[in-house]
Amino acid sequence: MKYQDNIDEIVALQPDYLGLIFYDKSPRYLDTTLTALPTNIKKTGVFVNASISEIIEKIIQYQLQAVQLHGKESVEFCLKLREAYEQEKMIISKEKTNALELIKAFSIHKDFNFSLLEPYQENCDYFLFDTKGSYAGGNGYTFNWNLLKKYSFTTPYFLSGGIGLDEIQQLQHFMNSPEAKYCYAIDVNSKFETKAGWKSITALTTFKKRLALK
């Protein structure tokens, strides 16, 4: 089975976003080409402390519609990335195109200071809340979602970190809680892998059905 076949099976499940890892220290690093994907599924490049030029290169090469930043990217970096994207797209297409969706990830722990998010709101479309662990994503375990009671902003966020079939009941309870008011999406990854970068379609299908996702 080719990697593209696995991607095609995932696409058939109609996710809203499809993450492509462009972090060369990750076992999930994407170093191959892909065939065209449906435009209604947002191809999302995942980067960790990459340069703006590297991110722009991948955006153009893979026609990314969203970028997820998992490193120590500053507010200024987010602004410059968005500006660089707009300039590049105008050069290529000769007209202004839709803005790039920018998702800034933060590792949440019991001492996390949510006030640090405030200056990011202007230049980020979404936040992503992940588990603080040894790796920049894909650690395979959840953080204490009760900590999101401290989240006082209105920027929508992705909930991430160790979410799998065993977390469905917990997730259903969370989605009915006040702290889930601005939860925009659920990000899943390592708990559905058969090996790094390869997803179990059976497990993903079960997850989608049991959680009643549309």
Image: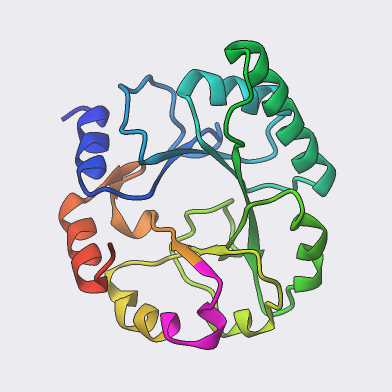
Foreground of the two, 18 or 199 = 18
Region rendered in magenta: 174-183
The question of residue 137 being in magenta is answered with no
Q: Identify the residue at image location x=22%, y=35%.
A: 8
* Residue 113 visible in the picture: no
Q: Which part of the image, by quadrant, shows the C terminus?
A: bottom left
169 relative to 185, above or below: below
Q: Is residue 102 left or right of residue 52?
A: left
Q: Looking at this view, name the residue that lies furthest to the front.
A: 95
Q: Identify the residue at image location x=75%, y=45%.
A: 73
Q: Identify the residue at image location x=36%, y=34%.
A: 39
Q: Residue 156 occupies which quadrant of the picture?
A: bottom right
x then y, percent, for residue 128: 58, 59
x then y, percent, for residue 134: 59, 57
Q: Identify the residue at image location x=45%, y=68%.
A: 141
* Residue 108 visible in the picture: yes
x then y, percent, for residue 196: 36, 43
Q: Residue 2 occupies which quadrant of the picture?
A: top left
Q: Is residue 37 left or right of residue 123?
A: left
Q: Could you tell me how many numbered marks the image carries?
A: 0
How does the figure colour the protein chain or chains? rainbow
136 relative to 162, above or below: above
x then y, percent, for residue 144: 55, 80
Q: Which part of the image, by quadrant, shows the N terminus?
A: top left
Foreground of the two, 177 or 141 = 177
65 relative to 58, above or below: below
